[in-house]
């Protein structure tokens, strides 16, 4: 695997090293030793899949709070997504900054997301399937999020939103959840 750190410290793009022959290729998508060698958490508590019918579907911006913070390794295994993460670590120089990465079945790219990051994505094609390896178990009592269009983050999505859940539309804005903290950033 090839690990490339993004501008958000601790978040990595994980590209595959393909071993190719006349049959096709073989590649590792996860290795505890390689993840630990890059200082990344290597625990996998569960794996999830998300299937999305329509191009423009948006899911996010989700995260879990302590004591159930999640690391994630996300790959698009059918179709394409614009995957977005937001740094929610107040001590980080990139606090409240985001990046977007195109993950597709063709580029086979993964995105490693540290805990204390919000995560969401928009589908770029119909019939998109996304695979998640999660570093902690889903804990609904610690699950929360921010709105996809929150001005505190300024995320620019590539397409108009075609589908979004009522739950994702109902998340508070950053300012509403964190009254008084914006002045110190």
Image (cartoon, rainbow, N blue to C red):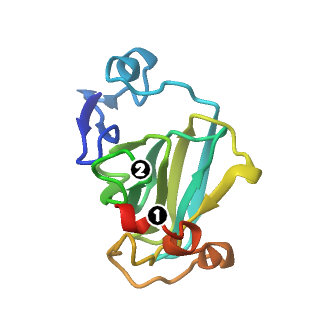
Name the N-terminal-most of marks 2 and 1. 2
In this rendered view, identify the residue nearer to me: 154 or 181: 181
The residue identified by callout 1 is 181
In this rendered view, identify the residue nearer to me: 72 or 109: 72
Q: What residue is rendered at 34% in x and 74% in y?
A: 154
Q: What residue is rendered at 39% in x and 59% in y?
A: 83
Helix, strand or loop at disc 1? loop
Q: What residue is rendered at 31% in x and 39% in y?
A: 12
Q: Residue 32: x percent and y percent?
A: 45, 18
The residue identified by callout 2 is 90
The dot on residue 11 is: none
Q: Residue 28: x percent and y percent?
A: 38, 26
State how far apart marks 2 and 1 are (Cα): 10 Å
Viewport quadrant of the N terminus: top left
Viewport quadrant of the C terminus: bottom left
Q: Residue furthest top?
A: 33
The image quarter containing residue 158 is bottom left
Using residue 109 as the reference point, say whether residue 55 is left or right of it. Answer: right
């Amino acid at each position: 695997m090839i690990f490339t750190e993004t501008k958000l410290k601790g978040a990595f793009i994980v590209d595959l090293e393909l071993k190719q022959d006349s049959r096709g290729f073989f590649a590792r998508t996860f290795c505890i030793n390689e993840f630990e060698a890059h200082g990344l958490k290597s625990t996998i508590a569960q794996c999830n899949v998300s299937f999305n019918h329509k191009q423009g579907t948006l899911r996010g911006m989700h995260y879990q709070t302590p004591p159930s913070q999640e690391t994630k390794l996300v790959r698009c295994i059918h179709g394409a997504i614009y995957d977005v993460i937001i740094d929610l670590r107040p001590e980080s120089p990139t606090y409240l900054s985001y990046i977007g990465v195109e993950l597709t079945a063709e580029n086979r790219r993964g995105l490693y997301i540290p805990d204390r990051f919000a995560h969401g994505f928009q589908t770029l094609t119909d019939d998109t399937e996304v695979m998640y390896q999660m570093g902690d178990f889903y804990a609904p009592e610690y699950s929360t999020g921010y709105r996809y269009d929150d001005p505190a983050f300024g995320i620019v999505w590539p397409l108009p939103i075609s589908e979004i859940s009522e739950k994702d539309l109902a998340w508070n804005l950053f300012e509403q959840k964190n009254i008084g903290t914006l002045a110190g950033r």
